[in-house]
Image: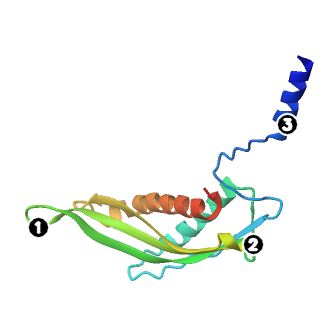
Amino acid sequence: MKRLIAILLVALSSCSISYKFNGASINYETTKTISVATFPIKAALVYPPLEELFTNSLKNAYIRQTRLQMVNSGGDLQLEGEITNYDLTPQAVTEDAYASQTRLTITVRVRFTNTKDPQYDLDQSFSGYKDFSSSQMLTDVQDELIQQITDELVDQIFNATVANW
């Protein structure tokens, strides 16, 4: 019996299971810092608060969900890019040829550099959208929609850059 317990202890101690509750897959022994540049708006339609909101939301996600230290530039992981699209399009046209829904779409181009492991470098666009009733004014729902779309985009970018599923 003692022999069986000893074998089980050796077997269990040689196996390790690692759970990461935030989804991040980062080697913190080699990767310690991250830098996130400001994401300027390069879209034809411009909503000025979006630049700061998006950039800060992206920074906050990495601060909250990883142990990386945020630096102004030259991080082990580097994120930069621009907001390339901020667009309204009609959806769900009614029988009288008016749109009953309008879609707000935001697209962001992201360049991700992993200086410690370049195989994970990324240059990709991410899009998110929300629909709202055409009976509402954009100015009445814009801030809420932008926050929801930004949250979705930040999740997509975080997963694509450090989740490594």
The residue labelled by disc 1 is 97
Alpha carbon distance from label 1 to label 2: 52 Å
Looking at this view, is 164 or 65 the one in front?
164
Placement of 7 over or under 32, stated as above or below: above
Alpha carbon distance from label 3 to label 2: 35 Å
The residue labelled by disc 2 is 75
The residue labelled by disc 3 is 13
Label number found at residue 43: none
Alpha carbon distance from label 1 to label 3: 68 Å
Looking at this view, is 53 or 88 the one in front?
88
Image coords of residue 47 (percent x, y)? 43, 74
Q: Please, what is the three-letter code of the amino acid marked with disc 1?
A: Ala
Name the residue furthest top: 1
- Quadrant of the image containing the C terminus: bottom right
* SS state under label 3: helix
Taking the spot 68% from the left edge, 47% from the top edge, the residue there is 20
The answer to which of marks 1 and 3 sits earlier in the sequence is 3
Indicate left or right for 150 with 117 as reference: left
- Quadrant of the image containing the N terminus: top right
Q: Please, what is the three-letter code of the amino acid marked with disc 3?
A: Ser
Image coords of residue 51 (percent x, y)? 52, 73
Looking at this view, is 36 or 146 the one in front?
36
Indicate left or right for 133 with 94 as reference: right
